[in-house]
Image (cartoon, rainbow, N blue to C red):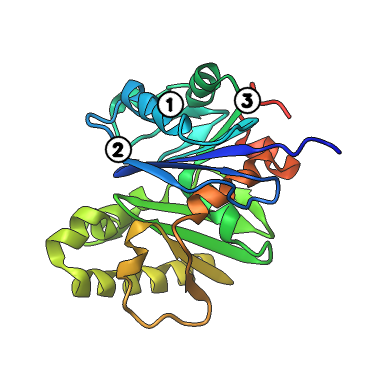
Amino acid sequence: MAHERKTLSIDIGGSGVKLLVLNEQGEPLTDRARVDTPQPPVPEKILAAIDELAATQSEFDRVSVGFPGVVRNGVVYTAANLDPAWIEFDLASALSKQLGKPVRAANDADIQGLGAISGQGVELVLTLGTGLGSALFVEGKLVPNLEMGHHPFRKGETYEEQLGRAALEEIGKQRWNRRLEKAIAQLDRLFNFDRLYLGGGEARKVSIDLNQKVSIVPNVLGLLGGIALWHDEQVETLASPNAQN
């Protein structure tokens, strides 16, 4: 019987670092492990946290990692909610060296989307957390590097400034939900999406009525979607240059 490859799936977030081990079907083989994001959130501290968490898991053959920013060929190019030291940091290579396994890295919202989408039509993903992540898929294919959270939204502020965790804490759940409702309507006009998936840690605060095109998905998809980085059809846009099968 062929060896079933096990994937360590990691989600680096602005408030927490999480991971678990998946089988080849993307099903969890271990319980999720989590620590608060180290402060300051520089590469060395977060990599050390990943090392400690990985030691609590079972054996694995390869690694998927989601990061809250633009990631190209395993290299980080934006890190608005972490530390500027991440800019141009080769996350995939550093983790591969540290863990001794091949690594593929991508934007965290892209990974959550890969775990949520149906693969049909235009599908948009928003992750509501420390910041606001986004991912767009057309017939199951990712449109890479969509950092919609930093685009203008309303009153001279971006989507992230209006809908990130800091805004939620400042204005309260009711006003935040009204803003989210406006954002959904505007994005529907912009993308004419067939489906919109709302994920991330703050999705549990959503209290507005959602139409049949919009659904809330569990935050754990940010980990479960990690298996998709190892599907051949995603390699072209998401794989790190040193990734191996």
Q: Is residue 166 left or right of residue 103?
A: left
Q: Is residue 185 above or below residue 154?
A: below
Amino acid on which disc 1 is placed? Asp
The quarter holding residue 86 reads top left
Which one is in front in this view, the residue at disc 1 or the one at disc 2? 1
Q: Label 3, label 2: how many angstroms apart (C-alpha)?
A: 24 Å
User: Which residue is labeled 3 in the image?
Assistant: 102
The disc at residue 139 is none
Q: Nearer the viewer, mark 3 or mark 1?
A: 1
Kind of residue at badge 3: Pro
Q: What residue lies at 42% left-to-right and 80% top-to-bottom?
A: 210
Residue at point 28% right, 31% down? 41
Q: Which residue is mark 1?
A: 51
Q: Indicate the position of residue 110 as horizontal and vertical percent values.
A: 53, 48
Quarter of the picture holding the C terminus = top right
State how far apart marks 1 and 2 are (Cα): 13 Å
Residue at label 2?
A: 37
Q: Tell me what residue is drawn at x 58 percent, y 19 percent.
A: 100
Q: What kind of element bears circle 1?
A: helix
